[in-house]
Amino acid sequence: MNQEAIRDARKLGVPKMLLLGLQHMFAMFGATILVPILVNQYGLPLNIQTTLFFAGIGTLFFHVCSKLKVPAFLGSSFAFLGGFSTMANMDQGIYAGMDPAVKLQYACGGIVVAGLLYLVLALLVKAVGVHKVMRFLPPVVTGPIIICIGLNLAPSAVNNASTCWWLALVAMAIIIVCNIWGKGMVKIIPILLGVVGAYIVAILTKQVDFTGVKDAAWIGFQPFVTNFSGSVAKFDVSAILVMAPIAIASMMEHIGDMSAISATVGEKFLEEPGLHRTLIGDGVATALAGLFGGPANTTYGENTGVLVLSRVYDPRVIRLAAIYALVLSFSPKFAALIGALPSAIIGGVSFILYGMISAIGVRNVVENQVDFTKSRNLIIAAVILVCGLGFSGGLTFQMAGASVTLTGLAIAAIAGILLNAILPGNDYEFGVSDSGDQNRGIHQ
Protein backbone atom coordinates (compact mmCIF):
# COMPACT_ATOMS: atom_id res chain seq x y z
CA MET A 1 0.00 0.00 0.00
CA ASN A 2 1.30 3.45 -0.89
CA GLN A 3 2.05 5.80 1.96
CA GLU A 4 -0.56 8.55 2.30
CA ALA A 5 0.68 11.97 1.17
CA ILE A 6 1.41 14.46 3.95
CA ARG A 7 0.58 18.09 3.08
CA ASP A 8 1.00 19.58 6.55
CA ALA A 9 4.24 18.34 8.11
CA ARG A 10 3.42 20.04 11.44
CA LYS A 11 1.31 17.05 12.41
CA LEU A 12 4.49 14.96 12.37
CA GLY A 13 5.98 17.08 15.15
CA VAL A 14 8.89 19.53 15.21
CA PRO A 15 11.72 16.94 15.47
CA LYS A 16 10.52 15.06 12.39
CA MET A 17 10.02 18.30 10.45
CA LEU A 18 13.59 19.32 11.24
CA LEU A 19 14.85 15.97 9.98
CA LEU A 20 12.77 16.24 6.82
CA GLY A 21 14.25 19.69 6.15
CA LEU A 22 17.70 18.20 6.70
CA GLN A 23 16.95 15.53 4.11
CA HIS A 24 16.03 18.15 1.50
CA MET A 25 19.18 20.08 2.34
CA PHE A 26 21.31 17.00 1.73
CA ALA A 27 19.41 16.21 -1.46
CA MET A 28 20.36 19.57 -2.94
CA PHE A 29 23.88 19.63 -1.48
CA GLY A 30 25.41 17.16 -3.92
CA ALA A 31 24.57 19.10 -7.07
CA THR A 32 24.62 22.61 -5.56
CA ILE A 33 28.12 22.22 -4.17
CA LEU A 34 29.31 20.28 -7.21
CA VAL A 35 28.79 23.40 -9.35
CA PRO A 36 31.42 25.55 -7.53
CA ILE A 37 33.72 22.51 -7.32
CA LEU A 38 33.54 22.06 -11.10
CA VAL A 39 33.81 25.80 -11.83
CA ASN A 40 36.94 25.89 -9.65
CA GLN A 41 38.35 23.12 -11.82
CA TYR A 42 37.83 25.42 -14.80
CA GLY A 43 39.99 27.98 -12.98
CA LEU A 44 37.27 30.38 -11.78
CA PRO A 45 37.13 30.82 -7.97
CA LEU A 46 33.40 30.24 -7.33
CA ASN A 47 32.88 29.85 -3.57
CA ILE A 48 30.89 27.14 -1.73
CA GLN A 49 29.79 29.47 1.10
CA THR A 50 28.49 32.06 -1.36
CA THR A 51 26.71 29.33 -3.30
CA LEU A 52 24.96 28.04 -0.17
CA PHE A 53 24.03 31.56 0.94
CA PHE A 54 22.24 32.42 -2.29
CA ALA A 55 20.65 28.99 -2.55
CA GLY A 56 19.03 29.68 0.83
CA ILE A 57 18.13 33.32 0.13
CA GLY A 58 16.93 32.47 -3.38
CA THR A 59 14.68 29.65 -2.15
CA LEU A 60 13.08 31.82 0.52
CA PHE A 61 12.48 34.64 -1.97
CA PHE A 62 10.98 32.14 -4.42
CA HIS A 63 8.56 30.92 -1.75
CA VAL A 64 7.46 34.48 -1.00
CA CYS A 65 6.86 35.11 -4.73
CA SER A 66 4.89 31.86 -5.05
CA LYS A 67 2.63 32.65 -2.08
CA LEU A 68 4.38 30.01 0.09
CA LYS A 69 2.57 27.27 -1.88
CA VAL A 70 5.18 25.55 -4.08
CA PRO A 71 7.48 22.92 -2.46
CA ALA A 72 10.51 23.79 -4.60
CA PHE A 73 14.16 24.35 -3.70
CA LEU A 74 16.46 26.62 -5.71
CA GLY A 75 20.03 25.39 -6.10
CA SER A 76 22.93 25.88 -8.50
CA SER A 77 22.11 25.42 -12.18
CA PHE A 78 24.17 22.90 -14.12
CA ALA A 79 23.01 24.52 -17.36
CA PHE A 80 25.48 27.37 -16.85
CA LEU A 81 28.57 25.16 -16.47
CA GLY A 82 29.23 25.44 -20.21
CA GLY A 83 29.13 29.22 -19.91
CA PHE A 84 31.61 29.20 -17.02
CA SER A 85 33.92 26.93 -19.03
CA THR A 86 33.72 29.27 -22.03
CA MET A 87 34.46 32.30 -19.86
CA ALA A 88 37.44 30.56 -18.27
CA ASN A 89 38.93 29.91 -21.72
CA MET A 90 38.27 33.39 -23.16
CA ASP A 91 41.60 35.05 -23.88
CA GLN A 92 40.77 37.78 -26.37
CA GLY A 93 40.23 41.53 -26.02
CA ILE A 94 39.81 42.63 -22.41
CA TYR A 95 39.98 39.01 -21.29
CA ALA A 96 43.58 38.51 -22.46
CA GLY A 97 45.65 37.76 -19.37
CA MET A 98 42.72 38.66 -17.10
CA ASP A 99 42.79 37.43 -13.51
CA PRO A 100 40.38 34.46 -13.05
CA ALA A 101 38.61 36.23 -10.17
CA VAL A 102 37.80 39.17 -12.47
CA LYS A 103 36.65 36.78 -15.22
CA LEU A 104 34.25 35.28 -12.70
CA GLN A 105 32.84 38.75 -12.04
CA TYR A 106 32.09 39.21 -15.75
CA ALA A 107 30.52 35.74 -15.89
CA CYS A 108 28.32 36.73 -12.95
CA GLY A 109 27.27 39.87 -14.86
CA GLY A 110 26.01 37.60 -17.61
CA ILE A 111 24.09 35.59 -15.01
CA VAL A 112 22.38 38.79 -13.80
CA VAL A 113 21.11 39.43 -17.33
CA ALA A 114 20.05 35.78 -17.66
CA GLY A 115 17.96 36.15 -14.50
CA LEU A 116 16.29 39.27 -15.89
CA LEU A 117 15.20 37.30 -18.99
CA TYR A 118 12.96 35.28 -16.66
CA LEU A 119 11.06 38.47 -15.94
CA VAL A 120 10.42 38.96 -19.67
CA LEU A 121 8.83 35.51 -19.93
CA ALA A 122 6.89 36.12 -16.71
CA LEU A 123 5.48 39.35 -18.19
CA LEU A 124 4.44 37.45 -21.32
CA VAL A 125 2.69 34.78 -19.26
CA LYS A 126 0.89 37.45 -17.23
CA ALA A 127 -0.12 39.41 -20.34
CA VAL A 128 -1.56 36.60 -22.48
CA GLY A 129 -2.33 33.98 -19.82
CA VAL A 130 -0.68 30.72 -18.88
CA HIS A 131 -3.02 28.66 -21.09
CA LYS A 132 -1.97 30.42 -24.29
CA VAL A 133 1.72 30.22 -23.41
CA MET A 134 1.47 26.56 -22.43
CA ARG A 135 -0.18 25.68 -25.75
CA PHE A 136 3.36 25.91 -27.09
CA LEU A 137 4.55 23.53 -24.35
CA PRO A 138 2.28 20.44 -24.49
CA PRO A 139 3.32 17.12 -22.89
CA VAL A 140 4.97 15.93 -26.12
CA VAL A 141 7.43 18.82 -25.63
CA THR A 142 7.78 19.10 -21.85
CA GLY A 143 7.87 15.33 -21.20
CA PRO A 144 10.99 14.66 -23.30
CA ILE A 145 12.59 17.86 -21.96
CA ILE A 146 12.12 16.61 -18.38
CA ILE A 147 13.57 13.25 -19.47
CA CYS A 148 16.59 15.08 -20.91
CA ILE A 149 17.10 17.00 -17.65
CA GLY A 150 17.52 13.73 -15.75
CA LEU A 151 19.55 11.95 -18.43
CA ASN A 152 21.90 14.91 -18.83
CA LEU A 153 22.72 14.56 -15.15
CA ALA A 154 23.34 10.81 -15.50
CA PRO A 155 27.02 11.07 -16.58
CA SER A 156 27.67 13.18 -13.48
CA ALA A 157 26.25 10.41 -11.30
CA VAL A 158 28.35 7.74 -13.04
CA ASN A 159 31.54 9.81 -12.95
CA ASN A 160 31.14 10.51 -9.24
CA ALA A 161 30.23 6.91 -8.41
CA SER A 162 33.17 5.55 -10.43
CA THR A 163 35.64 7.14 -8.03
CA CYS A 164 34.75 4.36 -5.58
CA TRP A 165 32.01 2.02 -6.77
CA TRP A 166 31.65 0.04 -3.56
CA LEU A 167 31.07 3.22 -1.53
CA ALA A 168 28.50 4.45 -4.07
CA LEU A 169 26.74 1.07 -3.82
CA VAL A 170 26.66 1.40 -0.02
CA ALA A 171 24.84 4.74 -0.34
CA MET A 172 22.44 3.29 -2.92
CA ALA A 173 21.80 0.15 -0.86
CA ILE A 174 20.95 2.12 2.28
CA ILE A 175 18.52 4.32 0.34
CA ILE A 176 16.83 1.37 -1.37
CA VAL A 177 16.52 -0.69 1.83
CA CYS A 178 15.16 2.25 3.84
CA ASN A 179 12.68 3.26 1.15
CA ILE A 180 11.32 -0.20 0.33
CA TRP A 181 11.52 -2.03 3.66
CA GLY A 182 11.78 0.88 6.10
CA LYS A 183 8.99 1.73 8.51
CA GLY A 184 7.81 5.09 9.82
CA MET A 185 10.39 7.87 9.75
CA VAL A 186 13.06 5.60 8.28
CA LYS A 187 10.96 5.31 5.12
CA ILE A 188 10.50 9.09 4.94
CA ILE A 189 14.22 10.08 5.15
CA PRO A 190 16.07 7.47 3.04
CA ILE A 191 18.27 10.05 1.30
CA LEU A 192 19.53 11.54 4.55
CA LEU A 193 20.21 8.08 5.98
CA GLY A 194 22.00 7.07 2.78
CA VAL A 195 24.30 10.12 2.90
CA VAL A 196 25.05 9.90 6.62
CA GLY A 197 25.42 6.12 6.65
CA ALA A 198 27.75 6.07 3.66
CA TYR A 199 29.76 8.99 5.09
CA ILE A 200 30.28 7.08 8.35
CA VAL A 201 31.43 4.02 6.36
CA ALA A 202 33.81 6.24 4.38
CA ILE A 203 35.28 7.68 7.58
CA LEU A 204 35.72 4.22 9.14
CA THR A 205 37.49 2.98 6.01
CA LYS A 206 39.65 6.13 5.83
CA GLN A 207 38.20 7.34 2.53
CA VAL A 208 37.87 10.95 3.75
CA ASP A 209 40.58 13.63 3.84
CA PHE A 210 39.88 16.03 6.73
CA THR A 211 42.94 18.26 6.21
CA GLY A 212 40.90 21.18 4.89
CA VAL A 213 38.33 20.77 7.66
CA LYS A 214 40.93 21.10 10.42
CA ASP A 215 42.32 24.33 8.98
CA ALA A 216 38.93 26.00 8.40
CA ALA A 217 37.34 28.45 10.87
CA TRP A 218 34.04 27.61 12.56
CA ILE A 219 32.37 30.92 11.69
CA GLY A 220 33.15 33.30 8.86
CA PHE A 221 31.51 35.53 6.28
CA GLN A 222 31.16 34.69 2.62
CA PRO A 223 33.89 36.05 0.30
CA PHE A 224 31.51 38.56 -1.34
CA VAL A 225 31.26 40.25 2.09
CA THR A 226 34.94 40.15 3.04
CA ASN A 227 36.67 40.59 -0.33
CA PHE A 228 34.48 43.04 -2.20
CA SER A 229 32.65 46.27 -1.54
CA GLY A 230 29.21 46.38 -3.10
CA SER A 231 28.38 44.45 -6.24
CA VAL A 232 30.68 41.67 -7.42
CA ALA A 233 29.29 41.45 -10.96
CA LYS A 234 30.90 43.26 -13.90
CA PHE A 235 29.17 43.72 -17.25
CA ASP A 236 30.51 43.24 -20.77
CA VAL A 237 28.65 42.40 -23.99
CA SER A 238 30.80 39.37 -24.76
CA ALA A 239 30.23 37.82 -21.33
CA ILE A 240 26.51 38.58 -21.52
CA LEU A 241 26.27 36.85 -24.92
CA VAL A 242 27.99 33.80 -23.46
CA MET A 243 25.93 33.46 -20.27
CA ALA A 244 22.50 35.04 -20.93
CA PRO A 245 21.27 32.72 -23.75
CA ILE A 246 21.61 29.78 -21.39
CA ALA A 247 18.51 31.19 -19.66
CA ILE A 248 16.48 29.62 -22.49
CA ALA A 249 17.45 26.18 -21.18
CA SER A 250 17.05 27.04 -17.52
CA MET A 251 13.60 28.59 -18.13
CA MET A 252 12.47 25.41 -19.88
CA GLU A 253 13.95 23.45 -16.98
CA HIS A 254 11.96 25.66 -14.62
CA ILE A 255 8.71 25.01 -16.51
CA GLY A 256 9.48 21.31 -16.65
CA ASP A 257 10.22 21.21 -12.92
CA MET A 258 7.05 23.15 -12.12
CA SER A 259 5.09 20.66 -14.23
CA ALA A 260 6.84 17.74 -12.53
CA ILE A 261 6.21 19.12 -9.04
CA SER A 262 2.58 19.82 -9.92
CA ALA A 263 2.11 16.26 -11.21
CA THR A 264 3.96 14.82 -8.20
CA VAL A 265 1.90 16.56 -5.51
CA GLY A 266 -1.38 16.70 -7.45
CA GLU A 267 -1.67 20.49 -7.57
CA LYS A 268 -1.95 23.11 -10.36
CA PHE A 269 0.97 25.40 -9.61
CA LEU A 270 1.28 26.72 -13.17
CA GLU A 271 -2.10 28.35 -12.68
CA GLU A 272 -2.09 29.05 -8.92
CA PRO A 273 0.04 30.74 -7.69
CA GLY A 274 0.88 31.02 -11.40
CA LEU A 275 3.82 30.39 -13.71
CA HIS A 276 4.54 34.13 -13.87
CA ARG A 277 5.09 34.21 -10.10
CA THR A 278 7.41 31.20 -10.03
CA LEU A 279 9.39 32.60 -12.97
CA ILE A 280 9.79 35.95 -11.18
CA GLY A 281 10.97 34.17 -8.03
CA ASP A 282 13.52 32.07 -9.92
CA GLY A 283 14.68 34.96 -12.12
CA VAL A 284 15.21 37.48 -9.32
CA ALA A 285 16.96 34.82 -7.21
CA THR A 286 19.31 34.12 -10.13
CA ALA A 287 20.00 37.80 -10.79
CA LEU A 288 20.64 38.47 -7.10
CA ALA A 289 23.05 35.55 -6.84
CA GLY A 290 24.96 36.69 -9.92
CA LEU A 291 25.12 40.25 -8.64
CA PHE A 292 27.13 39.12 -5.62
CA GLY A 293 29.28 36.39 -7.11
CA GLY A 294 27.06 33.30 -6.90
CA PRO A 295 25.98 30.83 -9.59
CA ALA A 296 22.61 30.92 -11.33
CA ASN A 297 19.76 29.31 -9.40
CA THR A 298 17.23 26.86 -10.72
CA THR A 299 14.38 24.80 -9.33
CA TYR A 300 15.83 21.47 -8.29
CA GLY A 301 14.75 18.14 -9.70
CA GLU A 302 16.67 16.44 -6.90
CA ASN A 303 14.24 17.80 -4.36
CA THR A 304 11.34 16.69 -6.54
CA GLY A 305 12.81 13.22 -6.25
CA VAL A 306 12.71 13.56 -2.46
CA LEU A 307 9.03 14.56 -2.69
CA VAL A 308 8.38 11.37 -4.64
CA LEU A 309 10.22 9.25 -2.07
CA SER A 310 8.96 10.83 1.14
CA ARG A 311 5.44 11.87 0.00
CA VAL A 312 5.72 14.87 2.32
CA TYR A 313 4.58 17.83 0.19
CA ASP A 314 4.62 20.64 2.77
CA PRO A 315 6.58 23.71 1.48
CA ARG A 316 7.53 24.49 5.10
CA VAL A 317 9.96 21.57 4.96
CA ILE A 318 11.69 23.12 1.92
CA ARG A 319 11.94 26.46 3.71
CA LEU A 320 13.62 24.70 6.63
CA ALA A 321 16.20 23.33 4.19
CA ALA A 322 16.76 26.87 2.87
CA ILE A 323 17.30 28.19 6.40
CA TYR A 324 19.79 25.37 7.06
CA ALA A 325 21.70 26.28 3.90
CA LEU A 326 21.66 29.96 4.85
CA VAL A 327 22.94 29.34 8.38
CA LEU A 328 25.59 26.87 7.28
CA SER A 329 26.86 29.30 4.65
CA PHE A 330 28.41 31.23 7.57
CA SER A 331 30.59 28.26 8.54
CA PRO A 332 33.78 27.74 6.52
CA LYS A 333 34.40 24.57 8.54
CA PHE A 334 31.05 23.10 7.55
CA ALA A 335 31.65 24.03 3.92
CA ALA A 336 34.99 22.22 4.17
CA LEU A 337 33.27 19.22 5.81
CA ILE A 338 30.77 19.00 2.98
CA GLY A 339 33.55 19.53 0.50
CA ALA A 340 35.26 16.48 2.02
CA LEU A 341 32.22 14.30 1.26
CA PRO A 342 33.52 11.60 -1.11
CA SER A 343 32.30 12.05 -4.67
CA ALA A 344 31.27 8.39 -4.71
CA ILE A 345 28.55 9.04 -2.11
CA ILE A 346 27.19 11.93 -4.17
CA GLY A 347 27.24 9.60 -7.17
CA GLY A 348 25.37 6.83 -5.35
CA VAL A 349 22.60 9.18 -4.22
CA SER A 350 22.46 10.78 -7.67
CA PHE A 351 21.96 7.40 -9.33
CA ILE A 352 18.51 7.21 -7.77
CA LEU A 353 17.50 10.88 -7.78
CA TYR A 354 18.55 11.66 -11.36
CA GLY A 355 16.75 8.57 -12.61
CA MET A 356 13.61 9.70 -10.85
CA ILE A 357 13.68 13.01 -12.71
CA SER A 358 13.62 11.23 -16.06
CA ALA A 359 10.98 8.83 -14.78
CA ILE A 360 8.76 11.82 -13.97
CA GLY A 361 9.16 12.93 -17.59
CA VAL A 362 8.07 9.50 -18.77
CA ARG A 363 5.08 9.66 -16.44
CA ASN A 364 4.23 13.09 -17.82
CA VAL A 365 4.01 11.59 -21.31
CA VAL A 366 2.12 8.46 -20.23
CA GLU A 367 -0.47 10.15 -18.00
CA ASN A 368 -1.31 12.65 -20.73
CA GLN A 369 -1.69 9.79 -23.22
CA VAL A 370 0.60 11.28 -25.85
CA ASP A 371 -0.14 9.38 -29.06
CA PHE A 372 3.18 8.16 -30.49
CA THR A 373 1.44 6.41 -33.36
CA LYS A 374 1.29 9.91 -34.89
CA SER A 375 4.40 10.87 -36.83
CA ARG A 376 4.39 14.51 -35.61
CA ASN A 377 4.65 13.42 -31.99
CA LEU A 378 7.38 10.90 -32.74
CA ILE A 379 9.38 13.51 -34.65
CA ILE A 380 9.06 16.15 -31.92
CA ALA A 381 10.08 13.75 -29.13
CA ALA A 382 12.90 12.25 -31.22
CA VAL A 383 14.42 15.63 -32.11
CA ILE A 384 14.20 16.84 -28.49
CA LEU A 385 15.93 13.72 -27.15
CA VAL A 386 18.69 13.73 -29.78
CA CYS A 387 19.35 17.46 -29.36
CA GLY A 388 19.22 17.31 -25.56
CA LEU A 389 21.60 14.36 -25.35
CA GLY A 390 23.60 14.71 -28.57
CA PHE A 391 24.84 18.28 -28.19
CA SER A 392 26.87 17.40 -25.12
CA GLY A 393 29.27 20.27 -25.74
CA GLY A 394 26.54 22.66 -26.83
CA LEU A 395 26.45 24.60 -30.09
CA THR A 396 28.85 27.50 -30.53
CA PHE A 397 28.37 30.30 -33.05
CA GLN A 398 29.47 33.88 -33.56
CA MET A 399 27.21 36.79 -32.63
CA ALA A 400 28.27 40.45 -32.61
CA GLY A 401 31.90 39.37 -32.76
CA ALA A 402 31.59 37.10 -29.73
CA SER A 403 31.38 33.34 -29.43
CA VAL A 404 28.00 32.23 -28.10
CA THR A 405 27.29 28.72 -26.83
CA LEU A 406 23.81 27.22 -26.49
CA THR A 407 23.64 24.12 -24.29
CA GLY A 408 22.08 20.89 -25.55
CA LEU A 409 19.04 21.45 -23.35
CA ALA A 410 18.50 24.93 -24.81
CA ILE A 411 18.76 23.55 -28.35
CA ALA A 412 16.31 20.76 -27.49
CA ALA A 413 13.81 23.23 -26.01
CA ILE A 414 13.99 25.57 -29.01
CA ALA A 415 13.68 22.69 -31.50
CA GLY A 416 10.75 21.12 -29.66
CA ILE A 417 8.80 24.36 -29.31
CA LEU A 418 9.33 25.30 -32.97
CA LEU A 419 8.40 21.85 -34.31
CA ASN A 420 5.27 21.74 -32.16
CA ALA A 421 4.23 25.16 -33.46
CA ILE A 422 4.99 24.38 -37.11
CA LEU A 423 3.89 20.77 -37.60
CA PRO A 424 0.15 20.29 -38.27
CA GLY A 425 -2.17 18.10 -36.22
CA ASN A 426 -1.58 19.13 -32.60
CA ASP A 427 -3.62 16.53 -30.71
CA TYR A 428 -3.49 18.11 -27.26
CA GLU A 429 -5.65 21.03 -26.18
CA PHE A 430 -5.65 22.56 -22.73
CA GLY A 431 -9.03 22.82 -21.04
CA VAL A 432 -10.44 19.77 -22.83
CA SER A 433 -9.08 16.98 -20.64
CA ASP A 434 -9.36 17.97 -16.99
CA SER A 435 -7.24 15.08 -15.73
CA GLY A 436 -4.63 15.66 -18.43
CA ASP A 437 -4.40 19.36 -17.67
CA GLN A 438 -4.05 18.68 -13.96
CA ASN A 439 -1.20 16.25 -14.62
CA ARG A 440 0.53 19.06 -16.49
CA GLY A 441 -0.04 21.47 -13.64
CA ILE A 442 -2.90 23.10 -15.57
CA HIS A 443 -6.50 22.95 -14.40
CA GLN A 444 -9.43 24.70 -16.06
Image (cartoon, rainbow, N blue to C red):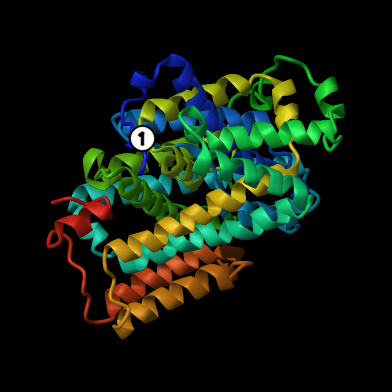
Q: Measured along the vertical axis of the image, is residue 184 above or below residue 270? A: above
The residue closer to the viewer here, 285 or 356, is 356
The residue closer to the viewer here, 417 or 306, is 306
Residue 234 seen by the camera = no
How crowded is the residue under tag 1: few (<14 C-alpha within 10 Å), some, or many (20+)? many
Q: In the image, what residue occupies the spot 65% across and 51% down?
A: 84
| Drawn side of residue 163 relative to residue 234, left or right | right
Q: In the image, what residue occupies the spot 69% across and 55% down?
A: 85
* Residue 173, position as x, y percentages in the image: 64, 45
Q: In the image, what residue occupies the spot 74% across and 21% down?
A: 333
Question: Residue beneath label 1, please?
Answer: 313
Q: Quadrant of residue 378?
A: bottom left
Q: In the image, what residue occupies the spot 66% across and 42% down?
A: 171
| Drawn side of residue 63 relative to residue 75, left or right | left
| Drawn side of residue 307 relative to residue 388, left or right | left
Q: Measured along the vertical axis of the image, is residue 407 above or below residue 117? A: below
